[in-house]
Amino acid sequence: MSEAKAPSNFIRQIIDRDLAEGKNDGRVVTRFPPEPNGYLHIGHAKSICLNFGIADSYGGACHLRFDDTNPEKEEDQYIRSIQRDVEWLGFEWAGPVRFASGYFDQLHDFALQLIDKGLAYVDTQSPEKIAEMRGNFTTPGQNSPHRDRSVEENRALFARMRAGEFDEGEAVLRARIDMQSPNLNLRDPILYRIRKKAHHQTGDKWVIYPMYDFTHPLSDALEGITHSLCTLEFEDHRPLYDWLIDNVDVPARPRQYEFSRLNLNFTVTSKRRLKLLVDEGHVDGWDDPRMPTLSGLRRRGYTPAAIRNFCEALGVSRADSVIDMSVLEEAVRDDLNQHAPRAFCVLNPLKLVIENWPEGHQETLVAPVHPQDEAMGSREMPLTREVYIDREDFREEANKKYKRLVLGDRVRLRYGYVVRAESVVRDDAGEIVEIRCSYDPDTLGKNPENDEGQGKLRGVIHWVSADRGVPCEVRLYDRLFQVANPAKVAEGESFLDHLNPESLRVLSGCVVEPGAAGAVAETRFQFEREGYFSVDRDSTAARPVFNRTVGLRESWPREA
RNA sequence: UGGGGUAUAGCCAAGUUGGUAAGGCAGCGGGUUUUGAUCCCGUCAUUCCCAGGUUCGAGUCCUGGUACCCCAGCCA
């Protein structure tokens, strides 16, 4: 999956054809248009990768434009987080950060044009009345009694709307299209509504705000966007998009194309639901490592490359789909396997005492940072008489499929010596608290001679010096929801009912090799035989905290 | 219910003038291995939602069905 070359998809084919026909003077300009009302999530990553990826490979440009036409839902903090996430993913937008609100003056002029052409009118009916008159799937709409107001009257009324002479809900500007249309979006859609709320960009300059349907196509045209890519649910809006482009004097002719959005199982990707998880405290914020937000995935340890490769591997189509979480996980493993330095960390420590190792003696062993990449250098690991191994790596008895330490048998301490478990020490409750073993001094970097006919070593396990290892915390994550499609709920249920109560498990008594203890936040490791981990921002040198990004792929008989 | 879409393997997805089903993930079998990882090799759709039809030949064309998704915000 690494370095996947952008595969063919229907959008690229459209662009190829446009280019062949000489459309748009050979320019390709796309845009990523988030509304700043939440954090970006993995679904947005697909759109980002598509839009920026296309601009890149066609030598075009991709704009970052905030679709900020609703001051009630939007906040400045989201603007900052969105920019940060796009940059983190590794994309660079062409020109300045743009805002639909930056076009409010021009948009207002476009509205005037429509009024003058008799294609827009001010409706002073109540919101309820307007909804009622719009009809429904089976019933055609009815014309508003205000539909045939004169241009002068509409001009005057619209000016009064802008001047704040109406309260919210008292008047709207509507396109004059077709109340009979089977497409509800064409039944005289609302273009402007009144919102007496300060806007994060324009302050209190406006009390009328343009709707998405009006703003989007015209903003695209103003920016010279050639291919306006959006998700399937906007398909029904395309006739309106085209109607506006055709009826307003704009400098360009953008085209909208729709693709299916990304769905991942065992999580939710809707800003509404994600915001609820945050607001009600079910997670630790937008960047909780269990969240499918880009900032959550980042804190979890995902790399930009992993996410980009993932999106590349998905493809782009118009079919509804749900991608298995395993595909995302495989994408990080693939990237981290190649690039993450290796380290040892014992998650559930069990003391192992090497009885024939001199008291107080310490030896420094050398191990590669990455066994398949010498260029990454080597690391030093102190070995002392007492070390910790994982409880899971020891059994008093086991069949031969168990490739770890068994009482009376031998195993290699990885990058160190071969040890034999001689006896166990128990506490009053009968639980094993210590393993006593012996080591073979002649097994560093080589297999034991005089094998006493005992066959091959059972296996290799990781370890950390008890004296030199650093106590640390490890946070293990599991899927946030217990069901594949949390959004699908029965009567009276909430998606929150499907939250996985064990999505976070904190292990506080772990021990990591000293060389990995001082790493700064977001440093990623492969803890050998355990998985991929990332230093959390809560981490300190004295008390490191690691997030498990994803486990190693495991394939061994559960019955061993 | 009117309109707009989509159906190719467990999950994605190529397939564009009809010429005999790419690739990835998952799975399965084997090899290498001081990580039960990685890596390597092999395997994995007689069939493309269903039923008819046209054709020497249909995932691709025609007819008729079926299933699922989106739309009735002064949200985007």
Image (cartoon, rainbow, N blue to C red):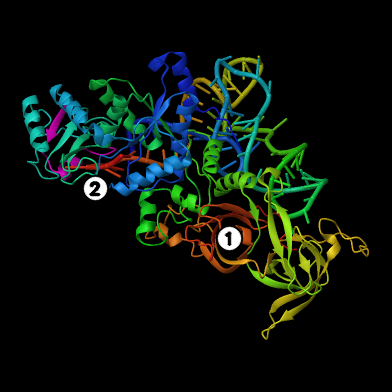
Task: Label 1, secondary structure: give it.
Answer: loop
Q: Position of residue A411 (x, y in %)?
A: 79, 64
Numbered mark located on residue A517 in the image: 1
Q: Is residue A126 one of those drawn in magenta?
A: yes
Left or right for A263, reference B29: left
Q: Counting other residues with Cα less than 10 Å from the Cα at mark 1, is it few (<14), some (14-19), or many (20 or more)?
A: many
Q: CA distance from mark 2 to mark 1?
A: 45 Å
Examine the rendered structure and indicate whether residue B8 appears above or below residue A339. above
Residue type, mark 1 in image: Ala
Residue type, mark 2 in image: Glu
Examine the rendered structure and indicate whether residue A397 appears above or below residue A225. below
Left or right for A102, reference A146: right
The residue drawn where x is 53% and y is 48% is: A302
Residue A520 in view of the camera:
yes
The quadrant of the picture occupied by the N terminus of chain A is top right
Q: Chain of mark 2?
A: A
- Disc 2 marks which residue? A72
Tell which of B32 and B54 is nearer to you. Answer: B32
Examine the rendered structure and indicate whether residue A325 appears above or below residue A346. above
Q: Chain of mark 1?
A: A
Front tag of 2 and 1: 1
Tell which of A276 and A242 is nearer to you. Answer: A276
Q: Residue most toward the bottom?
A: A428
Q: Which residues are magenta?
A: A119-138
Same chain check for tags 2 and 1: yes
Residue A477 in view of the camera:
no
Numbered mark located on residue A256 in the image: none
The residue drawn where x is 47% and y is 18% is: A17
Left or right for A195, reference A53: left
Q: Position of residue A89 (x, y in %)?
A: 47, 41
Q: Position of residue A38 (x, y in %)?
A: 35, 48
